[in-house]
Each structure stands twice: as structure tokens, then as C-alpha cells.
Amino acid sequence: MSAAFKGRTLLRYTLFQIPDLILLSLGLAAAVRWWGLPVYVAYGLVGLWLVKDIVMFPILRVAYESDSASGVDGIRGALGVVTQSLAPAGYVRLGSELWKAELASGAEPVSEGSAIRVVEVHGLTLIVEKVTAPKS
């Protein structure tokens, strides 16, 4: 992972933590003013809140990463294996997921066990083509 990508992830995480920190600070300021909470206790709680955010970042980092190859763009071009013959529709496996698939227009039927490539995505149906071995 590049340094710029890590920096963007940290920035996104930090920006999402700011509203909570502001609400906590306002609540503690009110507690100091109206209920007599000692100021050092308020500062200590804000410090603990910041430590919590720092400790949680490695755990929550993945949720704040933006991956450009996600969703439909991440599936297009993916390779898979036919689990139910495509003539013209059937099922394919991409990684650990089973997807309904149809052959691209004009494609010949593809038998079970053959390798395929995703060319389009229509809703929850993949449009695929058979992967042919390169000629040497």
C-alpha cells in the first residue's frame, strides 16, 4: 500500500472522528460548568477518547480505505470457473462466490469446469465469455 493511500485512509478516519470529539467536548464542558466536574477529569476523558481512536485505527482501517476496484468495476475482468454449463445461462464461481451467469451474445456454450472471464454485469447476473488458452 502506498504512503499516499495510507495518508488518505488516516485522513478519512480522522475526519470521521471529529464530530464525536466535538460532541464529547461540549458535553464535558457542560458537565464542568453545570455539575462541577473537575476540569482535569474532563481533559483526562478527552485524552482517553483520543487514545481510543488511536488504538482502534488499525482495527477499523479497512472500513475507511477506498478501493477503486470495488463493486461492478472490481468484478469486470475477473476470472472464474463454470459450475453449471452455460447454454446460454448457468452458474459460475468467482473466488468463493457463486454467481448466475449468461454468455455474451454470439458465444458458444461453455461446459462445466471451463474458465471464464466477466465482461459485463447486469444486476446480479454476470455476462461472461470463455477464456481461451493463448497460442504459443
Image: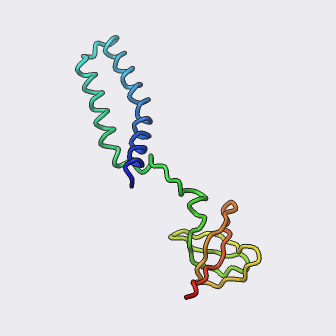
Residue drawn at x 24%, y 16% is: 38
Q: Is residue 99 above or below residue 16?
A: below
Judged from this view, the residue extending furthest toward the right is 106
Corner quadrant of residue 117? bottom right
**Percent x, y of residue 85:** 66, 82
Residue drawn at x 43%, y 43% is: 8
Q: Quadrant of the C terminus?
A: bottom right
Corner quadrant of residue 34? top left
- Is 16 left, or right, of 119 in this rendering? left
Residue drawn at x 68%, y 69% is: 127
Q: Is residue 21 above or below residue 98?
A: above
In depth, the one of 57 and 42 nearer the eye is: 57
- Is 19 left, or right, of 128 in this rendering? left
**Percent x, y of residue 39:** 25, 17
Q: Is residue 120 above or below residue 38?
A: below
Q: Quadrant of the N terminus?
A: bottom left
Total of numbered circles in the picture?
0
Residue drawn at x 61%, y 84% is: 112
